[in-house]
Amino acid sequence: MTSFASKVFCRVERICHHLPVLLNTFLVFSITGEVSYLVLVEAPLEAEQKKTVWSSRWKALHLLVQYFMLGNICWNALLFVRTSPSIKGVFLGGEGMGQGWRYCYTCETHTPPRCSHCYDCKVCVLRRDHHCVFFGQCVGFRNYRYFISCLLFMWSGLLYATLMNAEVFIVILKEGVTVHSVLLLLIPWIMLISGQVSARAFAFAFIADTCVVGFLLVSAFFFFHLFLMFRGQTTREWYSSRRPYNLGIFGNLRHTLGIHWYLCWLCPLIPSPSPGDGINFQVTGSLEPTR
């Protein structure tokens, strides 16, 4: 009985571990499909404009930009998940241990500066930033480039989707701000279950709401990590006022995104090797805590 319960628990834990990834994937492709429908079928609202302002070339340009962002989101996310940021397979010996090294009693090994143990991943992570629950993996030295690039294209994609869904809000509010329109925007699920709106109206309202909320959340994450990257800090180091690894804006970009930092954001396939190894870092300030 105990073994059966443990197997069930492990299976439920595995499903919960992958649930955020599946949910994110569903939302990304749902938003993409809805925006594609708006571009191809619904836009513009006025029938006489369909052959003028909203020409076939304009629609093709919209779709090209849209699927360029989608491709970058998916490819960066895939490389982020498949790139292990842990110390597994990394030789931590070398010239000896200096200031900032610690001993991890869980992994039973000495770890370099800026490395810490993740109890979700059950391993120490080089230059650990945080554990990303949306991808089920830690953000560290080797996969930070893909993480920040994915955030960039998610932010730009959600901004684009929000602007495209402005027409959805116009249609919902065209008769004025009524109780029905406000409830449809705020609680579309309740309106669908109660039979107040059709499934089509619910789908458009729900995805439009998701775009707005998602854009606000991703904006907060994206600009926070841009702020940290410019300062040469990780999320864990942000709690401290010290910035011992700050190399200046361009130096921080180079050590975070690689030597081709000015190009690598265009496509995850552009090679941009990091000048560091995730073990040794150039120290520009005091490592001692301020008093």
Image: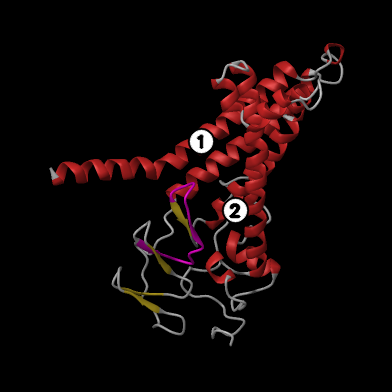
Please, what is the three-letter code of the amino acid marked with disc 1?
A: Thr
- Is residue 240 visible in the rendered image? The answer is yes
> For the C terminus, which image quadrant?
bottom right
Q: Are marks 1 and 2 in contact (CB under 8 Å)?
A: no
- Residue displayed at 44% across by 52% down: 137
Up-down: is 263 above or below 39?
Answer: below
Q: Residue 34: percent from the left, percent from the top?
A: 63, 25
Check disc 2 and report its element: helix, strand or loop. helix
Q: How many marks?
A: 2
Check disc 1 and report its element: helix, strand or loop. helix
Question: Magenta region: which residues?
Answer: 123-136
In-front residue for pair 57/202: 202
Q: Residue 163: percent from the left, percent from the top?
A: 75, 34
Question: What mark, if any, has residue 25 been given in the picture?
Answer: 1
- Is residue 253 visible in the rendered image? The answer is no
Q: Quadrant of residue 62?
A: top right
- Residue displayed at 81% across by 24% down: 176
- Residue displayed at 56% across by 78% down: 282
In-front residue for pair 239/107: 239
Q: CA distance from mark 1 to mark 2?
A: 17 Å
Please, what is the three-letter code of the amino acid marked with disc 2?
A: Ile
Q: Give the crowd class for mark 2: few <14, some 14-19, many >=20 residues within 10 Å.
A: many
